[in-house]
């Protein structure tokens, strides 16, 4: 009995000493950090179901606002949170070769589609795949998709106005989600899923379930990030049921496309890239786009493009409904475009200054990704400081906090699109507005997402007056560990406009 107690005490003391040593990592490096709990570090704060992670980090951000960074611990893993835009420029651009990779996410399970997606790739694999995928989002490709996107946006607006006749308010997040799913499926894959006309849209519901914040989802997220071995041992799978649904859709569409006519869309471009990549007559075929990798990118585009863009459309609509003066200014700009061109054109929409300003300000207030992270791949001395990051250290960028810092954004809580007008953009501090990330690893589909958001908002503003229904002045947000999502929809009153 005594031996058991001695062993137990020895284990506890050893763990406590090890924890104390690990949680002294940043102090030894001269980096400020709040006290950490034994074993947990700061996980009890940043992954609490009762506290929003970005607000917990924002409190620390302002506590250490005079320092270019501060330290955290996710369990025993040290994470450097970088707050200084000038340091971020080095990490994102100047010294990108030290920060090519994102943090490890997932367990690299054999057969997993999640591990084959672009965001999960590292080092040369990421560079090769990014180089293959980049040509699919050129301005020319976007312009060719514009008419189809406009037609789907018209259906989106019609569906919203139809709902407005029957219900006290319209849930813009629900409608925007259906629109983005239809747009991605149609423009990228030639799939007509008709989410806007179906009572129970299968595609949109599957995507919504994939992103739903549930206790099980948070548990999976925690285990995949911090406890991959127990995750595997317990029989959990990286690919959830919804991944299987979209995989089947992608595989069936690829088979049909290989046997049929080309459309010149995202899928055709991927198939062409795969054919070139696998050409054995070339000196050194790379074999980057295997069948599995190709299918994984299709799943990524279908799923990831659904939620973030739908949130951007709904948040922007809410802010315009809440601010009548900018709403009217935007409507006047769009009406002038239609008067000059006869209709909304690709050039007109993409160059509309106040539309651009409204969307960018909405993305400042509600950035899709709350944080961005990078893995230090080789020892790195941060310029202007005495801090040496070691290979394997994690760096975290608090996007939400930078977007709301009053040092860079006067009156940061309020919707002020004028900040992003051409004459005012020069006053914006670089690396304080990052809705799509920055540098070589920014969002690949940024142009597509922006065009989609602008078209949807423009069509809606031209067709209806937007107002906030009583009780919905403020949007309730999910306690999401990574994405900014409305919790109970985004409700708006729509009144059809009478056109002369």
Image: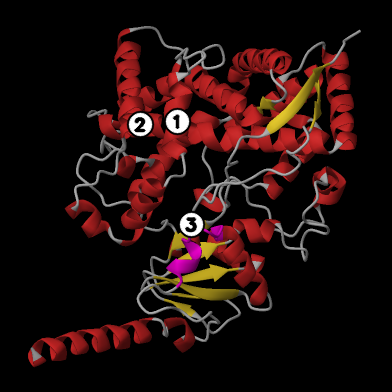
Residue 162: tell me if it is visible.
Answer: yes
Q: Splitting the image into 4 quarters, where does residue 139 fall?
A: top right
Q: Say left or right for 115 vs 34.
A: left
Range drawn in magenta: 42-53
Is residue 93 rendered to the left or right of residue 500? left
- Location of residue 337 in the rendering, given as x and y in whole percent from the top left corner: 84, 20
Q: Earlier in the sequence, mark 1 or mark 2?
A: 1
User: Of 462 and 95, which appears nearest the observer?
Assistant: 462
Residue 431 in view, yes or no: no
Please name whichever residue, 458 or 267, is drawn nearer the observer in this view of the structure.
Answer: 458
Q: Position of residue 92 (x, y in %)?
A: 55, 59
Residue drawn 78% across the image and 33% down it:
468
Secondary structure beneath label 3? loop
Q: What residue is drawn where x is 54% and y is 51%?
A: 479
Residue contact between numbered discs 1 and 2, judged by CB atoms under 8 Å:
yes
Disc assigned to residue 476: none
- Tell me where residue 270 sits by quadrant: top left
Q: Residue at x 61, y 79 (%)?
A: 384
Q: Quadrant of the C terminus?
A: top right
Residue 2 locus on image (x, y percent): 10, 92
- Which one is in front in this view, the residue at disc 1 or the one at disc 3? 3
Residue to which mark 2 is pinned: 242
Residue at numbered disc 3: 49
The residue under label 1 is 207
Q: Position of residue 163 (x, y in %)?
A: 67, 16
Q: Tally the numbered discs.
A: 3
- How busy is the neighbourhood of tag 1: few (under 14 within 10 Å), some, or many (20 plus)? many
Residue 187 in magenta stretch? no
Depth check: give the residue in front, 113 or 240: 240
Taking the magenta stretch, the answer to whether it contains residue 50 is: yes
User: What is the spatial separation of the Cα atoms under label 1 and label 3, in whole angstroms?
Assistant: 23 Å
Give the quadrant of the N terminus: bottom left
């Amino acid at each position: 009995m005594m031996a058991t107690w001695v062993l137990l005490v020895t284990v506890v003391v050893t763990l406590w000493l090890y924890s104390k040593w690990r949680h002294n990592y940043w102090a030894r490096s001269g980096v400020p950090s709040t006290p950490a709990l034994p074993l947990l570090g700061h996980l009890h704060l940043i992954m609490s179901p009762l506290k929003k992670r970005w607000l917990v980090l924002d409190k620390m951000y302002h506590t250490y606002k005079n320092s270019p960074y501060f330290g955290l611990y996710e369990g025993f893993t040290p994470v450097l949170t970088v707050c200084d835009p000038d340091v971020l420029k080095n990490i994102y651009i100047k010294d990108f070769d030290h920060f090519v990779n994102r943090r490890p996410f997932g367990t690299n399970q054999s057969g997993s589609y999640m591990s084959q997606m672009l965001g999960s790739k590292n080092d040369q694999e990421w560079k090769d795949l990014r180089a293959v995928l980049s040509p699919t989002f050129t301005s020319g490709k976007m312009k060719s998709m514009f008419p189809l996107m406009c037609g789907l946006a018209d259906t989106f607006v019609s569906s919203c106005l139809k709902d407005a006749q029957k219900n006290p308010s319209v849930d813009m997040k629900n409608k925007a989600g259906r629109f983005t799913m239809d747009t991605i499926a149609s423009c990228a894959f030639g799939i007509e899923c008709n989410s806007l006309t179906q009572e129970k849209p299968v595609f949109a519901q599957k995507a919504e379930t994939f992103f739903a914040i549930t206790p099980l989802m948070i548990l999976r997220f925690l285990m995949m990030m911090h406890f991959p071995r127990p995750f595997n041992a317990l029989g959990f799978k990286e690919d959830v049921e919804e991944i299987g649904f979209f995989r089947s859709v992608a595989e069936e569409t690829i088979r049909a496309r290989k046997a049929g006519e080309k459309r010149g869309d995202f899928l055709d471009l991927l198939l062409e890239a795969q054919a070139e990549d696998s050409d054995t007559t070339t000196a050194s075929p790379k074999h980057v786009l295997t069948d599995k990798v190709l299918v994984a990118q299709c799943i990524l585009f279908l799923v990831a493009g659904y939620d973030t863009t739908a949130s951007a459309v709904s948040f922007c609509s809410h802010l315009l409904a809440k601010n009548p003066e900018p709403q009217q200014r935007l409507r006047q700009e769009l009406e002038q475009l239609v008067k000059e061109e006869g209709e909304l054109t690709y050039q007109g929409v993409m160059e509309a200054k106040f539309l651009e300003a409204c969307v960018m300000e909405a993305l400042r207030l509600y950035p899709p990704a709350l944080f961005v992270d990078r893995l230090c791949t080789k020892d790195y001395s941060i310029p202007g400081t005495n801090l040496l990051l070691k290979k394997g250290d994690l760096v975290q960028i608090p996007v939400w906090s930078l977007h709301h810092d009053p040092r860079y954004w006067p009156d940061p809580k309020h919707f002020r699109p004028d900040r992003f007008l051409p004459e005012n953009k020069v006053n914006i501090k670089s690396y304080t507005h990052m809705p799509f990330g920055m540098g070589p690893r920014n969002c690949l589909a940024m142009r597509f997402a922006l065009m989609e958001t602008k078209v949807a908002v423009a069509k809606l503003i031209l067709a209806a007056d937007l107002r906030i229904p009583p009780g919905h002045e403020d949007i309730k947000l999910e306690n999401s560990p990574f994405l900014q999502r409305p919790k109970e929809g985004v409700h708006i009153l729509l009144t059809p406009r009478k056109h002369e």
